[in-house]
Each structure stands twice: as C-alpha cells, then as structure tokens.
Image (cartoon, rainbow, N blue to C red):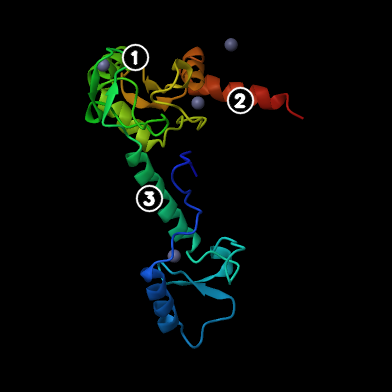
Amino acid sequence: MRTFSNPSSSPPSATPPRTASSSVIDSRRSKHRLPNVPEGLFQCVTCEQWKPKEDFNVHNGSKTGRRSKCKVCRNTYKREWAAKRAEDRIPKTKACKECGETKPAQEFHRSRTSKDGLVSKCHGCSSAYYRKNYSGWSNDEVVEAFKAQDGKCAICETEMELDGPKSKKPRADHCHETGRKRALLCNHCNLALGHMKDDPTRLRKAAEFLEGFQA
Ligand SMILES: [Zn+2]
Ligand SMILES: [Zn+2]
Ligand SMILES: [Zn+2]
Ligand SMILES: [Zn+2]
C-alpha cells in the first residue's frame, strides 16, 4: 500500500467522523442480520456479505475487535482514497524542468512517484526525451506500458520511475532483429540482455552455471 505523507489530512486508517450515515448502516445491519448466521461470521458494512473473521483486519478499538469493512472493501476504499489524494495535491501550474516555462498541469503527465503528482517535463519536452531514448516507442506507448506493468521491470519486477533519475527510468526493450517492441525493463535487466546477446540459450546456461555453484 502506497501512502502519501500530508500532515494536513487524516490517513485512511483514521476513524471517519460519525455522521447520520453510520446510524443508517447500524439499522441496515440489524435488518440484514439473519437468524441462522453461523458462529464467527461478520457482516461487512460495505458489501453486506457475511464472511469469516479472517476476512476482516484486526482493529482493537471496535466492539468486535475487527474492522467493519471486509479486507476486499477496505482495500478498494484505501485505493480510492489514495487516488483522490493524488488528484488533490496536483498544482494548477508547474514550471517545466527542461524548458523552464510555467504551464498548466494538463501539459504534464501524471506521475505516481513524484511529490506533486506530475512528471518534471512538459509534454513537448518529454516527447523529445522519449524520441531520443525510446526509439520505436511513442511517448504514449511508454506511459501505457509503464501503467500495464504497474511500474515494474518485466523481468526482475524492480520498481522503476518514469520521471526518476536516469538509473531508475525504464528502458524500452525491443528485438534487435525484428525491431518488435517487447516491454519496459530496468536498466540492469536491459543491459544484461544486451550483454548476453539477447540469446535465451546463453541466458539459461548462465543460470545453470550459477546454480551449479550453489550448495
Ligand atoms: Zn466487503
Ligand atoms: Zn518543457
Ligand atoms: Zn529488471
Ligand atoms: Zn561466454
């Protein structure tokens, strides 16, 4: 779970203020309480499903000792909360690191890893960067692939940063014979493939070689 530090707002674990809706939930809960509920089942206040107590996180402050939302609903809630927080912290305008011009936020791609939620270079400048560093990949293709891979290297799953330092930026991998795009890789994995001549047999033998020296 990624968390954003912002002292001015409460973290997702904080108890929401008691409002009229919590009494609505209470009455709904009792109405839905079935006569033959097996021992040890709890009803989630969000999805209203009855689930075993392992499906609820431990919460010492509550009557049942468990969270009122099931783990699935709680994760959804946290994700939505984080997404909303990410939107809130985006400034209206930003100065591009490359051209120095102050431009509206729409001129910058979103970034999950940067402090203000935006990449450092404007569309125009980052397009130029991508053209130089991701031959065969368009700017949008890189961003798409990054999202699809959840920001992780397709081989070792190291977290990469679209807008991070050079060493953390994803490398756009392509087949040198056909030119076909493959996936985004971390710097190390991309270099390793190159050094091993993109040869699966060689890579497999290298793995066997290493394993041969393990206890
Ligand atoms: Zn639920
Ligand atoms: Zn710029
Ligand atoms: Zn990697
Ligand atoms: Zn060799």
Mark 3 or mark 2, earlier in chain = 3
- x and y, in percent, of residue 4 in the image: 46, 39
Q: Quick check: 14 above or below 46?
A: above
What is the spatial separation of the Cα atoms under label 3 and label 2, in whole angstroms?
41 Å
Asked whether disc 3 touches disc 1, contact meaning CB atoms under 8 Å apart, the reply is: no
Q: Residue at x 59, y 76 (%)?
A: 40
Residue 207 is labelled as 2
Q: Name the amino acid, label 1.
A: Asn
For marks 3 and 1, give the CA distance. Answer: 33 Å
Q: How many marks?
A: 3
Residue extending farthest bottom:
35
Circle 1: is it few (<14), some (14-19), or many (20+) Cα within 10 Å? few
Residue 100 x %, y %? 28, 13
Residue occupying the point 41% across, 83% down: 31
Disc 2 marks which amino acid? Ala
Q: Nearer the viewer, residue 85 or 17?
A: 17
Q: Is label 3 in a helix, a strand or a loop?
A: helix
Residue that mark 3 sits on: 80
In the rendered view, does 192 fall on the left or right side of 214?
left
Considering only vertical position in the picture, is 182 above or below 55?
Answer: above
Of the two numbered discs 1 and 2 in the rendering, the one whose residue sits closer to the viewer: 1
Residue type at mark 3?
Glu
Any mark on residue 133, and which? 1
Confirm if mark 3 falls within 8 A of ligand 1: no
* Residue 144 or residue 118, whichever sits in front: 118
Q: Residue furthest right?
A: 215
Q: Quadrant of the C terminus?
A: top right
